[in-house]
Structure formats: C-alpha cells, structure tokens
Image: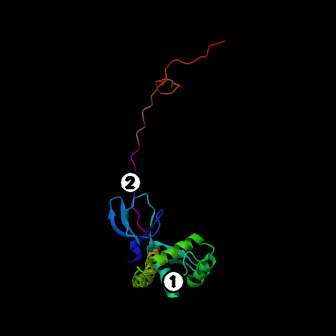
Amino acid sequence: MELKDIVAIAGQSGLHKIVGRSKNGLIVETIGTGRRFSTSFQDKVSVLEDISIYTVEEDLRLNKVFLKLKDAGEVPTAKDEMKKSREFLIATIQLDSERVYDNDIKKLLNWYHWLKDVLDFSKLNEEETAETPAESSDAVEASAETSEEAKPKKTAAKKAAAPKKAAAVKTAAAPKANSKGAGGSKTTYRPKSV
C-alpha cells in the first residue's frame, strides 16, 4: 500500500484506502475494519501523499516524516504525554514547535501507528529519490523560462472595433410606478379623519 492510495476524510475517524471511484466521488475502505463506503463532493478528502509537516528548515512531506519515524525506532503513541511526544518529534524531524498544534501531533502519531504494519516503506524510499531529480529539472526549466523572457515577444495586431450604434431614445413619458408594489391596487389608502 502506498501513500497515494490512502486518504483522510474530515468527520470520519481513521484512515481509508481508495478502492474505486464512483460518479459522485470515491469508494473507500477503512483501514483496520474493512468497512466500505462512498464519499461525495461535499466531503473534504485529503490524500496523505500531499500532506506536509512544518519543520524548522522547510515543509517536510509525510513520506519523509514516516521514514524518519521508522528509523528512529520506538515512536511514542498519541496517548503518551504531549510534552514527551513533542520533544521526540523536535529531535527526530526538527518539528517547528511554534506552528504545529498538539492535535496535529496526535494525528501524525496515530497515522504512523495505523500504517506502520501495512505501509510499503520501500515505496516511500522510491518517492523520496524520485523527488530529487524532479527538483533539479524544475531549476533547469526555470532558467529556460528566464532566458525566453529576455527575448522580445511578438504581439498580434488588434482589429479595430466597429463603432456601436446608439440606442434609440424614447421621448414619451413612462407611466408612474406604483409605490405599493407590482401587484398592488391603484387606489391609495387614506386613514379616516377623526
């Protein structure tokens, strides 16, 4: 199982594996229980591959975080003391303690413990090595774009727009609008004098 196949759904506990697609959303299976259900367009679905964690240096993708947690050995659970868990993550992945909340740490630790037995960590290594050449090719493309910007660009000549005809102006007076509304009667209400 890979991170691109696993999603978290807002309002649903646990993680879910993508099994298929329907015309209105995804068909997912809850990891651990095997319960299948479909999502709709209104559900907020987050693919774990797209999630990153704030660290001191940069944002760290979830695949790299899981690899570092696996290499660290014994990972605390979400039920452990929060101060101890935060210190562990600061030492392991250089977590930015000011920008990451306690709930996020609990969620991360829960996800790791749910996935450590079913996740293919060799695929996570491949994803990490695949990102490195892609980043260097992005730099080459960026330098190519800047050299193209230095060249003057040709612009297409605009066609002259035909003059618009003036709308005919009515000189007849329009009937006075009824102050009671569109469907009101033409009579006005006058209170009786006392």
N-terminal of the pair, mark 2 or mark 1, is 1
For the residues labelled 2 and 1, say whether their Cβ atoms are less than 8 Å apart. no
- Name the residue located 38 percent from the left edge and 54 percent from the top edge: 159
Which stretch appears magenta? 152-163
For the question of whether residue 124 can be seen, the reply is yes
Residue 21 in the image: state x and y as whole percent. Answer: 33, 64
User: Nearest the camera: 190 or 164?
Assistant: 190
Amino acid under disc 2: Lys
Instruction: Judge the density around disc 2: few (<14), some (14-19), many (≥20) Cα neighbours within 10 Å.
Output: few
Residue 142 in the image: state x and y as whole percent. Answer: 46, 77
Q: Which residue is mark 2?
A: 159
Q: CA distance from mark 2 to mark 1?
A: 63 Å
Task: Give residue 140's quadrant in the image.
Answer: bottom left
Q: What main secondary structure does the magenta stretch of the protein show?
A: loop
* Residue 156 painted magenta: yes
Q: Which residue is mark 1?
A: 69
For the C terminus, the image quarter is top right
* Residue 133 painted magenta: no
Task: Give residue 179's quadrant in the image.
Answer: top right
